[in-house]
Amino acid sequence: MANKPFKTYREQLDILRSRNLIIENEERAIDILRRVNYYNLINGYKKIFLEKSNSNLETYKENCTLEEIYSLYKFDRDLKNILLYYLIQFENSLKSICAYHFSNKFREDYSYLQVKNYSHEKEDFKYVLNNLAELSKIINKEKDNSVKPQIKHYIDKHHEIPLWVLINYLTFGNVSFFFNAMDNELKESVCKDFGIRLKRQYGNSYPIEKNILKDIIKISNLFRNVCAHDDILFSYRLKKPISTKESTSKFFRVKFKGNSLFDLVMLLQLVLPKDCHEEMISKIEFTFKLYSKSFKSISLEDIIEEAGFPINWTEDYKIKLP
């Protein structure tokens, strides 16, 4: 198949016009395409603006404008910035709690590089091997790093690297493997720490079981990757709902589907401090209001519904109180 030929900005706009998209100001439209390339903007965000048709020909909804598509791009970007910030808060908390409990149980130098200190369950073996490989790789990579010299300092001065130092070099994906590699006793200790805060702040007495926390980490990591790689957030769904969907539903007032952005917003209540989560909700609500008048051919409700948010989401997201 031949490659698609290069198109100038004006030729790109002509293609969009031929598909019923309104270009209100050509110079402004070209400026938008200079900021965000055609592929990322149009191919990324057009779907919700297209007429439903059995034809292979794309036609935009009546009165749809390029500005609307650009507004959706900006709306999605703002949501990504909000979500990424709070996912990092959870990531940092998870790192801190994991490092604390592991270091408390295994106090010898480099205990985290010993296979005997991890889960002996068959289903966890792949996580153990991956975790050990990643930790070794990070140490080898960072031991001569003079820009971020913390690991080099500990090797030179103390001849070992405490886990609470090394853990800061792990990605969310690395931490996911670390948690899954830990033995059941340590996993339960980590879950208990999150559960104690949940009970204190919400009065909810349901325990956060290790499989539930494993799924929270999984969905958080997947959505974090969407944000970090600047992919499309609002319409992103897990291919399969998290495996603990049914057991997780007991925490919430409304049906928990376990695969959308709204489901993640609900889940983060279980692992973020209450004031931190409420701050996130306020920022999301402000973003919705900020863009509420930015769309003509579709409504903001169409967009947030695509993200899994129900009409009464500001009440529906809340944890079920005892």
Image: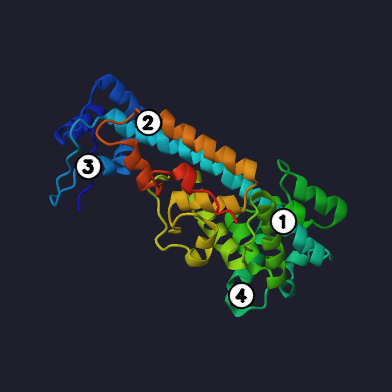
Which numbered disc flags the more N-terminal residue, 1 or 4? 1
- Vertical side of 257 occupied by 24: above or below: above
First reached walking from the N terminus: tag 1 or tag 3: 3
How far apart in space, not on screen, are marks 2 and 4 (Cα)?
49 Å
Three-letter residue code for mark 1 = Ile
Q: Which mark is residue 50?
A: 3
Secondary structure under the numbered disc 2 in the rendered image? loop
Q: Which of marks 2 and 4 is nearer the N terminus?
A: 4
Which mark is on residue 125? 4
Residue 140 in view here: no
With 232 as the anchor, is 101 left or right in this view? Answer: right
Estimate the x, y position of residue 10 in percent, counting from the top left.
22, 27
> Can you tell which quarter of the image residue 289 is in?
top left
Q: Residues within 10 Å of mark 4 (few under 14, many from 20)?
A: some
Query: Could you tell me the amino acid type at mark 2?
Result: Ser
Query: Is 108 positioned to the left or the right of 36 in the image?
Result: right
- Amino acid type at image mark 3: Leu
Q: Is residue 296 left or right of residue 152?
A: left
Mark 4: which secondary structure?
Answer: helix
**Residue position for label 2:** 292
